[in-house]
Amino acid sequence: EQAKAAAKAAKQQEASFKRANKHRPKEMSSKRPVSRAREVVAPVRKEGKDPRFEPSRPGEKEAAARRYAFLYDSVMPSERAVLRTAMKAERNPQTKAALSLQLQRLDSRLQQERTRRQRSELDHTVKAKQKEAAAAGKAPFFLKKSDKRKLELVAKFEALQSSGKLDRFMEKRRKHNASKDHRHLPDGRNDA
């Protein structure tokens, strides 16, 4: 009952705010005394923006990726090698776990960069095809996200095939899908 009473009081207080126009601030009647526990509505502060850390042009990400490509090409792989050797030499399990976590983070960042590069390469090829089509006088076409995803999968498939890892990948996929299907099966016999 106390909860109901508190909710009712909150509703009444909400209803007591008046506005002549929806764009004006909320006003309360001056005839009602102000409670000791005042709820002051703080104005929404504008977030300050630092232009140094915001991309100023649409192509800024690509330019930054080109500028800092050396990090992913030489610096991070060498860091990875150092971490691996340090992890192998380490005896303390806690330090070893911390190094392992650091190595995982580095690996994931390198993997993200690889996928980003593949995607940008795919985008460049698609844009080149669009330019050729436009030059030939054809109507412009724009790929949907699903079509882009399909193209990415095709590229991944071809890369796996060329590296000879396709069979292992497909076997993993089959196992994954089989376990997914197995989850949807009933748990045994339902004897009632």
Image (cartoon, grey):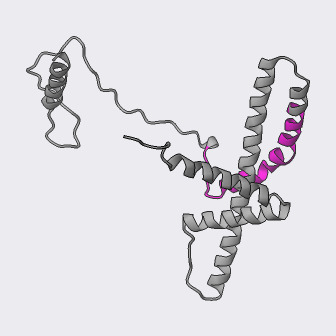
* Percent x, y of residue 15: 14, 31
**What residue is rendered at 68% in x and 82% in y?**
132
Can see residue 77? Answer: yes
Q: Is residue 6 left or right of residue 48?
A: left
Image quadrant occupied by the C terminus: top left
Q: Quadrant of residue 78?
A: top right
Viewer-closest of 115 and 134: 115
Viewer-closest of 39 and 168: 168
Q: Looking at the image, which residue sits at the far bottom?
A: 137
Residue 39's place in the image compared with 104, above or below, is above
Q: Looking at the image, which residue sits at the far front?
A: 191
Can see residue 56? Answer: no
Q: Is residue 8 left or right of residue 66?
A: left
* Percent x, y of residue 58: 61, 58
| Total numbered circles | 0
**What residue is rendered at 73% in x and 59% in y?**
118
> Magenta part of the protein: which range?
54-83
Asked if residue 149 is among those painted magenta in the image, a careful observer would answer no
Image quadrant occupied by the N terminus: top left
* Percent x, y of residue 27: 18, 30
Q: Quadrant of residue 10?
A: top left
Viewer-closest of 179 and 158: 179
Q: Looking at the image, which residue sits at the far top?
A: 36
Asked if residue 62 is among those painted magenta in the image, a careful observer would answer yes
Dominant SS of magenta comes to helix
**What residue is rendered at 18% in x and 14% in y?**
35
Q: Is residue 98 left or right of residue 177?
A: right
